[in-house]
Image (cartoon, rainbow, N blue to C red):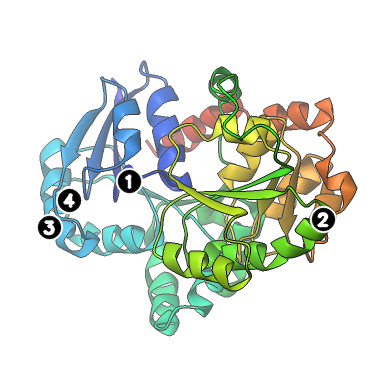
């Protein structure tokens, strides 16, 4: 008999966690698993990509706290073998709700960030630290995106290593390849074109990138910075660009359904985050053959550069070295396939799911 897995996520907005969940829903073997998806809020551009054989439940609450009673009723009604969720606040809510599950289902949670760093900048970080220490060990399995993330949970939150499994995020190279041959999105006659992608929020630290950009303009007068994404700091970042008198060179183009053409034609992709679990967008930029560079930060980003042999592109500050604009060697692509390839990562998830049943 097929094993029933209920995926639970807040929405299908265009973030890295949602992209990973979508990839798993697309590629987990149907001969082994029957898949369903519960959404706290049925919104987001990835809804249109969900496979037709995935049953979708709209909890229609908008907030995790209001969705918990509906999740409990759903688990008791459809009786999944495994409940699988991602993102810390939802994970904790599900762990607490388990006492009301009448059906014995295993709970697997996927952590999305370096928890200690994230909590250190929250106003109520002490409360969140307590919740992680108190409840995370109660999950049957915790999937971490990087070794750095697993170490953080083990050391800072005393979560047993036996509960954590490191599985890198999957990269569907064939899918990305199919979307990189579109029209060049950059105007003719300008450049170099620098691309950054992510939610316009504090943790992505786009302000650091914008503040460093004038020094590139001194070297390349035609440089343009293109920032793809939406978020609460849009107006703040626009104001910063105006203050620095570079508003004509910094372009905010919003969420792009196909960011891969931007990566494929860009002269450089920059990751400026304050912290990351394992940045999908960096892997995707490498898969597109784009030169990349990242500011140093806690999390799994360093692991990506070590694996792909590009540690010299993991830097303390943006000094815009000429070598950063050189195209990556074919070896980078081979390493992506070896460590982050779709087939390998799906097999790792299958092993974890089957180990619990």
Which residue has dot 3 on it?
69
From the viewer's perspective, is 158 left or right of 257? right
Q: Residues within 10 Å of mark 4 (few under 14, many from 20)?
A: many
Q: Where is residue 324 in the image (x, y as percent from the top left)?
A: 83, 46
Residue 138 lies, with reference to residue 301, above or below; the image says below
Residue 116, numbered circle = none
Q: Nearer the viewer, residue 106 or 63?
A: 63
Residue drawn where x is 74% and y is 47% of the image: 222
| Element type at mark 1 | strand
| Element type at mark 4 | helix
Which label sits in the foreground, 2 or 4? 2
In space, the residues marked 1 and 3 are separated at their CA atoms by: 18 Å
The reply to whether residue 145 is visible in this rendering is no
Which residue has dot 1 on it?
106
Q: Nearer the viewer, residue 322 or 7?
A: 322
Quadrant where the image shows the N terminus:
top left
In space, the residues marked 1 and 4 are separated at their CA atoms by: 15 Å
């Amino acid at each position: 008999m097929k094993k029933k897995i209920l995926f639970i996520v807040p929405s299908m907005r265009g973030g890295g966690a949602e992209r990973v969940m979508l990839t798993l829903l697309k590629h987990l073997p149907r001969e082994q698993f029957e898949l369903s998806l519960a959404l706290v809020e049925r919104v987001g551009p990835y809804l249109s990509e969900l496979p037709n054989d995935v049953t979708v439940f709209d909890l229609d609450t908008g907030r995790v706290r209001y969705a918990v009673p509906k999740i409990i009723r759903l688990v008791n009604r459809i009786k999944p073998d495994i409940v699988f969720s991602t993102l810390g606040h939802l994970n904790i809510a599900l762990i607490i709700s388990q006492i009301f599950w009448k059906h014995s289902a295993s709970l697997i949670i996927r952590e999305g960030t370096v928890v200690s760093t994230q909590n250190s900048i929250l106003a109520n970080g002490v409360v969140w630290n307590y919740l992680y220490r108190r409840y995370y060990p109660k999950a049957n399995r915790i999937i971490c995106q990087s070794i750095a993330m697993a170490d953080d949970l083990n050391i800072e939150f005393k979560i047993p290593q036996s509960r954590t499994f490191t599985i890198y995020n999957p990269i569907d190279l064939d899918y990305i390849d199919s979307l990189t041959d579109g029209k060049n999105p950059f105007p003719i006659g300008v450049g170099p074109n620098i691309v950054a992608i992510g939610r316009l929020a504090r943790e992505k630290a786009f302000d650091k990138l914008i503040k460093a950009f004038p020094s590139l303009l001194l070297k390349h007068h035609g440089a343009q910075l293109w920032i793809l994404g939406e978020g609460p700091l849009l107006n703040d970042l626009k104001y910063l660009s105006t203050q620095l008198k570079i508003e004509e060179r910094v372009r905010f183009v919003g969420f792009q359904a196909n960011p891969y053409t931007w990566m494929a034609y860009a002269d450089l992709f920059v990751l400026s985050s304050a912290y990351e679990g394992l940045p999908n967008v960096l892997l995707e930029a490498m898969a597109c053959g784009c030169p990349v560079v990242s500011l140093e930060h806690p999390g799994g980003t360093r692991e990506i550069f070590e694996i792909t042999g590009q540690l010299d592109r993991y830097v303390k500050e943006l000094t815009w070295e000429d070598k950063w604009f050189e195209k990556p060697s074919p070896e980078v692509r081979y390493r992506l396939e070896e460590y982050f390839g779709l087939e390998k990562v799906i097999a790792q998830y299958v092993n974890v799911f089957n180990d619990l049943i």
